[in-house]
Image: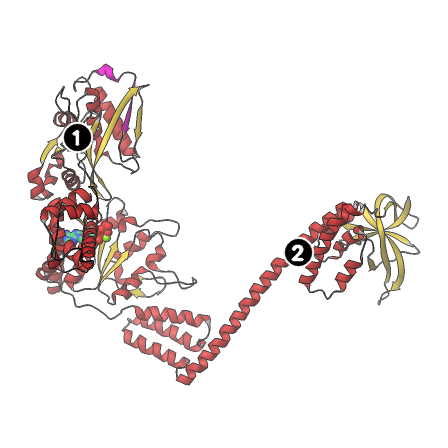
Amino acid sequence: MTKLRLVPLDDTVVFPNMDVTLPISVGNEDLVFLVPRHEQEYANVGVVARVTNRVRLPGGMKAVAVSGLHRGIAGAASPDGEGRLRVEVEERPDVDPPRDRTETIEREYRAVVEEILELRGDDGRISAFVRSITSPGALADTAGYSPDLTFEQKVELLQTLDVVERLELATRLQRERLAELQVRKRIREDVESGTQKQQREYLLRRQMDSIRKELGEDDASVVDEYRKKIEAAGMPEAAREQAERELGRLERMGESTGEASMIRTYLDWLIAVPWSQRSEERLDPVHAREVLDADHAGLDDVKKRITEHLAVRKLRAERGFKDDRKAGVILTLIGPPGTGKTSIGESIARATGRKFVRMSLGGVRDEAEIRGHRRTYIGALPGRLVRALRDAGTMNPVIMLDEVDKVGADWRGDPSAALLEVLDPAQNHSFRDHYLDVELDLSQVLFVATANLADTIPGPLLDRMEIIRFDGYTTAEKVAIARGYLWPRQIERNGLRPEEVTIADDVLQTITNEYTREAGVRQLERELGTVLRKTATRIASNMATAPVAVDLATVRDALGRQKFFAEAAARTAVPGVATGLAVTGVGGDVLFVEVATMAGAGGLVLTGQLGDVMKESARIALTYVRSHARQLGIDERAFEGREFHVHVPAGAIPKDGPSAGVTIVTAIASLMSGRPVKRTVGMTGEVTLQGRVLPIGGVKQKVLAAHAAGLTDVVLPERNAPDLEELPQDVRDKMRFHPVASADQVLDIALEPDGVLLAA
Ligand SMILES: Nc1ncnc2c1ncn2[C@@H]1O[C@H](COP(=O)(O)OP(=O)(O)OP(=O)(O)O)[C@@H](O)[C@H]1O
Ligand SMILES: [Mg+2]
């Protein structure tokens, strides 16, 4: 074992075959032992090196040139007489393994290195040097030359004595380097192509500038152009000052910067606001009524409310009452789809001579949609209100806020807060869009909102609204609408002339009842469209000659089999099923409550996506029937050891609310008594544990649905009886109403008498 002078190398690794110059003095030593060190910690493998030269550095310091020979493992160390450390070194020159063990990795290593050198732009010298190395151990050590390897990685390489392992390690390290270099290259290329694009744009802009100059449209004339437009826009003082300030900036900045184009966009928007434009408003209630009548059949209530609203405005205007900022209310039209809410909004605009813009709020979750983004955002734009005003071209349009019940709040802020400000007459004369950042006077706008349900409109908004309900149409009303509006419109859409096709009322009625089930008339219009499209095709292809009368056969041919049936009779033929009436987002509907029982521990299973309130109704219903069994003529013992299952189809649609209470009671009582529910009866009402029937909402929509479904008897809470006055006379004439105060009254009316068995 040799004892050599220890030369610590701080954060440096020297490999065999490397020549380095170190700023130290080593006395007369021939061989030294170079050991990497990091913060006083030594590696356990070092390199035995020969001192090849002693030099004196400029400035008088001594230095030695050493050349690495081979690896050695450091053993015990002790100071010599002069206080320098000497270590015992177990010398470990590389032992070349058999060729076949290294051949493949060697090839791989060389390939990776070649690629790295290519990426680095090597002039061929280094790669020639690498190629000249034949011993695999030395080849692996060339990785140590790399400036990209960390100190730790180099130490690891040094400490790997086994040549095969070392070569593998070196390959891995070089491969990582290669990957990194490739990424770097890609980034560099991206950046370069970016700057090239910028240069290109710059050149194009310069060319554009000179073309402009040729045409006499230099920067100055762009600015002049804006100045003229601002002049013409008739802005209020504050907006005008703002516009001029921005124009000044534009002038100073010149055309070609990115900032300038942002200023131009801003100015374009500011000018686009119709600051000084107003439509001459007509507030004549008689004229308004005429227009409303011309556009829509029926809806008498609605039209009355609208004309009243206009009459009041007219009086206030005529008598010079100042705008009362507290009195303004927002007309809000609430009702099922396709009942004409949006289209009556358009009529209001027409009736009052204002422009009409629709602003759909469905799914708006971001306050910035309403109010715009601040200009500091990249790609900022004004909010929808400013855009609506631009589209209208006047400051006093009718703006329809469609689907206010479908705005939602989330982390981006609450759009209803912005809406609140817009709709509040006390605030909306100074609305501030974040982007424009000047005050806008919205007090001249007539806002009309629409919604399918009032439940989901945020409370504070609802508070400021004057609600007009659309409850849906009866069959007779639908036929009248079809005759007067939908049919003529579809005739025109399908390229026909009115005298070319005719249809009888009873055919229209069949289409309404057998092919549609809806509160409104959208589906009906679509079906009529389908019928007319087929007719148009036949006329165009000479298979029929005008005039064509559309009869039932034509309808069946065009629309296929009947789509909707009066199901109540078939469904309620067995005990345990009762017909309820409900209101959903699409209007009134009938729903069937089914109850079954089986042996079990006395639980209650509920299915059909019932909400919490409806689930509680079911529990109350079961408890009520059970606790009043004797009184209802049911054997009390029949409940013992039995489990109940209540299901409300259609199973996929979520349902909630307390108004199914009487229906569930009836279904359970029907099942337990074996008496089926009368096929003509539909019912609604909340039930208490004592069996009192409490009032519910949506009577008109529910009765219309019952009527449409072919029911003739409606059981409803006594206290809802006054609501029946809202129903059209023809429906009132055809239906029997049974106001009730208690659940046993419901059962008396709804259940078939004892012992009657019905054929389905
Ligand atoms: N009473 C009516 N008279 C004439 N046409 C009507 C009447 N009611 C509805 N319509 C027509 O039915 C179609 C659908 O109406 P509209 O789009 O206004 O429904 P909506 O109530 O806004 O529905 P949604 O809640 O789905 O938005 C329109 O083409 C409209 O002209
Ligand atoms: Mg609509």
> How many neighbours does mark 2 have within 10 angstroms: few (below 14), some (14-19), or many (20 or more)?
many
Q: Is residue 639 magenta?
A: yes
At mark 2, the secondary structure is: helix
Q: Which mark is residue 693?
A: 1
The residue drawn where x is 21% and y is 47% is: 559
Q: Residue furthest top?
A: 637
Q: Which mark is residue 178?
A: 2
Q: Quadrant of the image for the N terminus?
A: top right
Q: Which mark is residue 375?
A: none
| x and y, in percent, of residue 257 in the image | 46, 73
Is residue 549 shown above or below 202? above
Q: Tell me, yes or no, if residue 329 can be seen here.
A: no
Magenta highlight range: 632-646
The residue drawn where x is 34% and y is 73% is: 241
Query: Disc 2, ligand 1: is the CB inside 8 Å?
Result: no
Q: Is residue 674 magenta?
A: no
